[in-house]
Amino acid sequence: MIRVYTGGTFDLFHYGHMNFLRQCSELGDEVIVALNTDEFIEKYKNQKPILSYAERYESLMGCKYVTRIVKNLSSEDSKPTILSVQPDIIAIGDDWKHKNYYKQMMFTEEWLREHYIELVYLPYTSIISTTILKERIRYGK
């Protein structure tokens, strides 16, 4: 059984989220999503999510590609949540390729190797995002 782990906010669940989770499901047998709490999002992004944790949870559970959702309780340090899932793969959008994902998640390549976890970058659906949706709503575009 290959476990695929990913994490995020998944606010205003849209086609880009679904496309990413479909790609995750093609990597393994289980897709486990670490869902960020409202408090973490507000602290990290300096704004509240549009949808509450419970609403985002239910939206994700309705996606056929998601096997299980865990709460990202460890805030900035993702290692405890990752270890609780024991994934084989961590999947992230390739929009992170030119950012410091390791620093963001507070782990190193060595830490991944020690835990036999592979990091996989998946193609990001750039034509849609929560930010784009917010702009459409705000400005009617």
Image (spheres, rainbow, N blue to C red):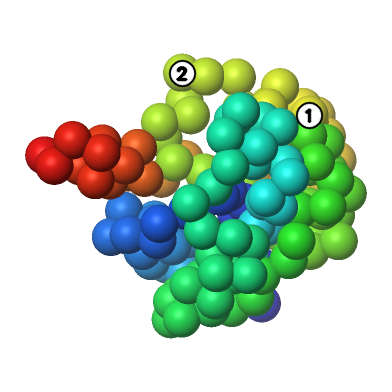
| Spot occupied by residue 17 in the image (x, y as percentages of width and height) | 39, 57
Where does the image place residue 123, in percent across and percent down from the top left? 33, 43
Circle number at residue 98: 2
Residue 7 visible in image? yes
Nearer-the-camera pick, 68 or 47: 47
Q: Are there few (<14), some (14-19), or many (20+) residues within 10 Å of tag 1?
A: few
Label 2: element kind: loop
Q: Quadrant of residue 84?
A: bottom right
To which quarter of the image does residue 1 belong?
Answer: bottom right
Q: Residue at x 40, y 31 (%)?
A: 95
Q: Which residue is mark 1?
A: 106
Q: Amino acid at mark 2?
A: His
| Residue 125 visible to an observer of this rendering | no
Q: Residue at x 64, y 62 (%)?
A: 53
First reached walking from the N terminus: tag 1 or tag 2? 2
For marks 1 and 2, give the CA distance. 16 Å
Report whether 12 appears left or right of 2.
left
Say which element carries label 1: loop
Mark 2 neighbour density, 10 Å: few (under 14) some (14–19) many (20 or more): few
